[in-house]
Image: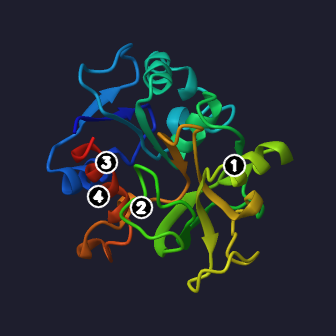
Amino acid sequence: MNAVILLFPGTNRERDMAIALEKATGRRPTILFHSETSLPAGTDLVVLPGGFSHGDYLRCGAMAARSPIMPAVAGFASKGGHVLGVCNGFQILTEAGLLPGALLRNASLRFLSMECHLRVENAATPFTNHWQKGAVFRAPMAHGDGNYFADDATLEALEKDGRVAFRYVTPEGEATEAANRNGARNNIAGILSENGRVLGLMPHPEDLVDPLMGGTDGLPLFESIAASFATA
């Protein structure tokens, strides 16, 4: 599997993402600077990692969404390519129109840096097939603008079509208001594109892929990706 990690000015999670991908796939991903205008031949997966692209000026991800590489990413996605956006990457995907909705300021208006618990809402995707539906896992969160918002019609479509990938829950798996620390609508932590091949989520599963990191809760996401391409 040939994975490409995009690097924008202000990105700071590319190495974490590379470690997670290499651990699951056995292959080191390519890190590609945002000023390029095409993806390497044979790219299977494009990853937009976390950070503060362009210092989060204007809106988080707004400037990165207009980087020279993004038309190539949009073209890749339109042809059925797989794309993963985490935290700032999720923000960029919504700003680029590759995923619906927007990421607003946290309801508390404070930066949140803590662990959260996520429930797997759809286990039949290239990103989640190593979990069972309803599985609960830990993941670190670190964001100031993770409050997912979409209008009622969009939310209804996401829920109806199984495009909510992850939801904020308690350790026991309950989607409560207290578990929803950033205020996201419907406790949504991650969503999928219409074809299920583009995933955006706010927490950082790449930061829990080894016991030395404090656990392996996030590893199934990357094992899912590896398995999907191994059987493709």
In the picture, the disc for residue 158 is 1
Q: CA distance from mark 2 to mark 3?
A: 18 Å
Q: Is residue 84 left or right of residue 208?
A: right
> Percent x, y for residue 127?
41, 52
Q: Residue at x 66, y 80 (%)?
A: 174
Question: As rendered, which of 160 and 21 lies closer to the eye?
Answer: 160
Q: Secondary structure at mark 2?
A: helix
Question: Which amino acid type is marked by label 3?
Answer: Ser
Q: Which residue is mark 4?
A: 223
Quick one: label 1 or label 4, which is nearer the N terminus?
Answer: 1
In the picture, the disc for residue 205 is 2
Q: Secondary structure at mark 1?
A: helix
Q: Residue at x 61, y 50 (%)?
A: 163
Question: Which amino acid type is marked by label 1?
Answer: Leu
Q: CA distance from mark 1 to mark 3?
A: 23 Å
Which of discs 3 and 4 lies nearer the camera? The answer is 3
| Residue 231 in sight in this render | yes
